[in-house]
Image (cartoon, grey):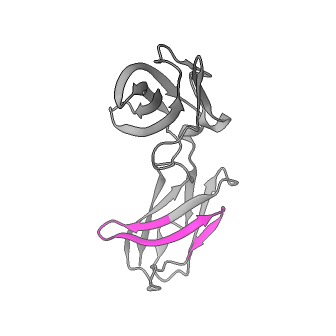
Amino acid sequence: MSVTLKIYDSSGLLVQSLSTGSAGSALTAVAISSNPYNPGTGSLLLSDGGWTHSFDGRDSTGAVLRNGIYLFVVASQEGGKQIGSVEFQVTVLGNGGAGVTLLVAPNPVHSSAEYVSIQWQPAGQVVELKIYDLPRGLVRGLGTCSSPAVWDLRTGGGEKVGDGIYIVSARVPGQRKPTLFKLMVAR
């Protein structure tokens, strides 16, 4: 009998669907190792008699689940037909909400300046940095960086950026939602 796990966020969006092995009989109840669950402490163990699954705390894109309440649906199937299912809620707290606090200086920056400094707390956390402008989108990706980082006020093609409002995006690897900071470039 095969077993699948589907995880839905609080809006009903399917965020993960996994084949989780097989069980000797239809699942009737599932024990979980912790609730609330902190993805930063390791896997969430799910079990029912002879079936056990170790869930790594990530959605289908590989991002760590953010803080919130999720619906877990564990279904057993035989011959392609669902025999039974167990539904339960898991509250995710802790690492799922990890992020950084950004500081970009100087702000505003004169367009004649050579660079801006981008810093964040916690300083030991690496982040994926990207710069966007409001009308056109991505200006430049700075890659995965350690604090502090420097942006030379140039696009990915090497051209100097013009006056305007830019968005500095810092995303902790494995997280879906980045931290954003507005930067004004002005004469």
- Residue 144 screen position, x and y as percent: 59, 64
Q: Which residues are magenta?
A: 130-151
Which residue is depicted at the point 33% across and 27% down?
Answer: 81
Relative horizontal placement of residue 183, taking residue 136 as reference (left or right): right
> Residue 124, relative to residue 43: is it above or below?
below
Task: Determine the image quadrant of residue 120.
Answer: bottom right
- Residue 38 screen position, x and y as percent: 60, 32
> Residue 109, relative to residue 44: is it above or below?
below
Which residue is depicted at the point 47% across and 26% down?
Answer: 1
- Residue 125 screen position, x and y as percent: 66, 53
- Image quadrant holding the C terminus, namely bottom left
Q: Which of the two residues, 5 or 83, is positioned nearer the viewer here?
A: 83
Total residue callouts: 0
> Residue 95 magenta-drawn?
no
Task: Determine the image quadrant of residue 74.
Answer: top left
> Residue 137 magenta-drawn?
yes
The secondary structure that dominates the magenta segment is strand
> Residue 63, relative to residue 116: is it above or below?
above
> Residue 81, relative to residue 98: is it above or below?
above
Relative horizontal placement of residue 87, taking residue 35 as reference (left or right): left
Which residue is depicted at the point 58% across and 49% down?
Answer: 100
